[in-house]
Image (tube, rainbow, N blue to C red):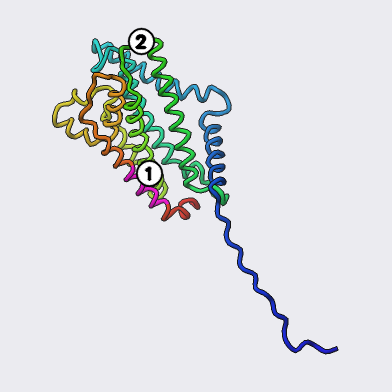
Amino acid sequence: MTLPTTPPTFTPIAPLEPLQPSPRAGGRAIVALVLREMATTFGRSPGGWIWAVAEPVAVIALLSFAFSLAFRAPSLGTSFPLFYATGYLPFLLFQDVSTKMAQALRFSRPLMTYPRVTLFDALAARLALNIATHLVVASIVIVGIEALWPTDAQYDARRLAAGFFMAAVVAVGIGTLNCFLFTAIPAAERVWLIVSRPLFIASGVFYIFEDLPGSLGDLLWYNPLLHSVCAVRAGAYGEYDATYVTPLYPLGLGLGALTLGLVLLRGRGADLTRG
């Protein structure tokens, strides 16, 4: 038997390209995360979602009752419930959305072992669900107030939307930045809890900007939520001319925080998702 004198040649096989998630796959991941978020937050019964409406209603009712004992009328209009609703609803949107965005990595980390689920999917899912929830809740509360205690308010849908949009942009920016900080620096969450406590008082929930003395007003003007709350009130009270509201300020602050948060998360995302 004669052995071959030349070794056989083999055609090299090109290495397989890594699978890249398609936009459709990313969309399916976000929808799945939204459904998981709904089941976790609201449960499988209507009672969980009803609480999302009951909480702001209870706070608005308490504020209305307490301040009606001390004042004959609110700073705008004649309806205490509407005045405090237009202040508390955008503040609640900011508070809840920023908190949920900041906890997105902690909440969805077990799912990030799947190649189709990314940190940005988790952020997008929390954003979509919570923004939609608060807009529905705000609509229900305002319609309910008008049904039970009709007011002379002259609603401007464009101004109302602008006010809530400002609150949402600030919430997304702060929440995304805190998503990185809370995970990378554990003490940052406690610091934020301390720093953010005065926001309820400093955001104009139960007063208007014109009620503030000059020096205090100059200081609180730098609170972006004050611009959002006053813009919502301008959308509910046609006679209220909130000339001090500067939309570019909260929008620029929110987008700047969002950009910084995304850059930091992208740079250390792999380390953070591994815990």
| Res 63 → quadrant | top left
Q: Earlier in the sequence, mark 2 or mark 1?
A: 2
Secondary structure category for the residue under label 1: helix
x 47%, y 23%: residue: 51
Q: Is residue 98 magenta?
A: no
Q: Give the extent of the magenta segment.
A: 255-265
Q: Residue 114: in sight, yes or no?
A: yes
Circle 1 residues within 10 Å: few <14, some 14–19, many ≥20:
many
Nearer to us of marks 2 and 1 is 2
Residue that badge 1 annotates: 178
Secondary structure category for the residue under label 2: loop
Query: Relative to 227, is 150 above or below?
Result: above
Check the picture and name the quadrant holding the N terminus.
bottom right
Q: Residue 113: in sight, yes or no?
A: no
Q: Residue 171: x, y in percent?
A: 36, 37
Q: Residue 174: x, y in percent?
A: 35, 41
x 34%, y 27%: residue: 158
Instruction: Please give the label number shown on residue 150.
Output: 2
